[in-house]
Amino acid sequence: MFKGLYVDKPEHIIIKEDQEPQLQAIQVRIRTEFAAIKHGTDFHIFSGQSPFERKRFDPELRLFVERDNTSNTGISTGYYAGNMAVGRVIEAGRDVTKVQPGDRVYCYSAACDILTKAESEVERLPSSMNQFDAVCLDPSLFAFVAVRDSRAGIGDTVVVSGLGAIGLFVVQLLKLSGCLHIIAIDPIEKRRKLAGTFGAQLTLDPTQCDVGMEVRKYLGQGADLAIESSGSYKALAGALRAVRNCARVVTLGYYKGKDTELELGAEWHHNRLELIGSMPVWNNPMRDYPLWNEERVTHTLRELFIRKQLASSGIVDPIVDFSDAASAYMETYRDPVNAIKLGIRF
């Protein structure tokens, strides 16, 4: 038997016990040591406000279309929740060659105490990487691709909106790219403080100021670039106000519901801004493919963590025991003021 974080009804999560599947020849069984959730995507689906609740995504048309009568309605219940996990292999199928029992590995996974995965889905954890680095490979992947999509470079001035795990890695990667001024925006104080340690020269609380005006006071003009990672329409409106004319704005947040904040007839129109959506998954190739693909990005990120050029320190916060994970999940979902990326000890 295994136990995992399970969404049993709308906006409600429990720890559920279930039967492990029979181990197949190419599968491994893992005893989980640590796991983390993905606040943006996990909470978006959990809220019942994702577009998948009303429609289905047609992969050939690349469109959300109406569901037919045989389609399931929605995806916000009946699933194990989580993003990435670290653990030790305790059993391997007869055809497994990549790892063996005793190996410490990481993988994309729900937060369950026992995992059954295909060997192709797991990677051996390098000894020079810790469990926090491993569960941060997903947010750093999205951050890495967004920074490349922004074409940020030496001397650029950049506004980063939304300082969850992805936004905090955006800040670090912009610093590595040689950006001259990084301005970090988030209403949560602990996130702003951490952004400052990662290289932001100025942090702003968007609930306490006009971000567009404050950026101009600090720089003397709008920023060259903005990267919006919060998934808030209000934050996107602020990012459009924070940049100079002909600037580039990159979005990678998962926006919830319908727009109520954007006024595209204002700065967007009059400053002739460029808006770029950054999405490295869902069969979207990198913009500089074939030189870059997801495999190369993942390898590069591992190297950056190993060389200590990227840091996960402080990003996985809070960390709770698995027995408290359901209540911590609900608490963080309702009020994220004390959270950046929820981690779970097993």
Image (tube, rainbow, N blue to C red):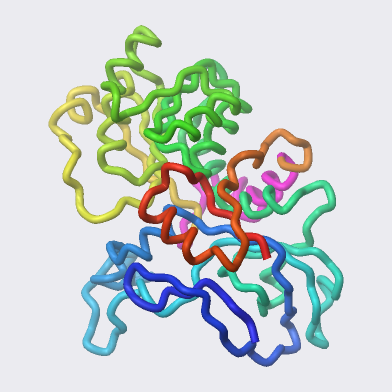
Position of residue 41 measured from the top left corner of the image (x, y, whole percent): 43, 58
The stretch drawn in magenta includes residue 167: no
Position of residue 60 measured from the top left corner of the image (x, y, whole percent): 36, 71
Which residue appears at 55% of the width and 49% of the height?
Answer: 139
> Residue at the left extreme?
265
Could you tell me which quadrant the C terminus lies in?
bottom right
Q: How many marks?
A: 0
The stretch drawn in magenta includes residue 302: yes
Above or below, 96 against 334 in this view is: below
Above or below, 193 against 230 in this view is: above
Q: Nearer the viewer, residue 78 or 273?
A: 78
Could you tell me which quadrant the N terminus lies in?
bottom right
Position of residue 97 measured from the top left corner of the image (x, y, whole percent): 84, 76
Above or below, 283 against 221 in this view is: below
Q: Magenta span covers which residues?
A: 282-304
Q: Is residue 76 left or right of residue 198?
A: left
Above or below, 46 against 268 in this view is: below
Which residue appears at 65% of the width and 63% of the height?
Answer: 85
Position of residue 191 measured from the top left corner of the image (x, y, whole percent): 49, 35
Q: Is residue 285 left or right of residue 264?
A: right
Image quadrant assignment for residue 252: top left
Q: Nearer the viewer, residue 343 or 309?
A: 343
Q: Nearer the viewer, residue 47 or 99?
A: 47
> Residue at the bottom extreme?
22
Q: Is residue 150 left or right of residue 261?
A: right
Which residue appears at 20% of the width and 53% of the height?
Answer: 258
Which residue appears at 24% of the width and 78% of the height?
Answer: 67
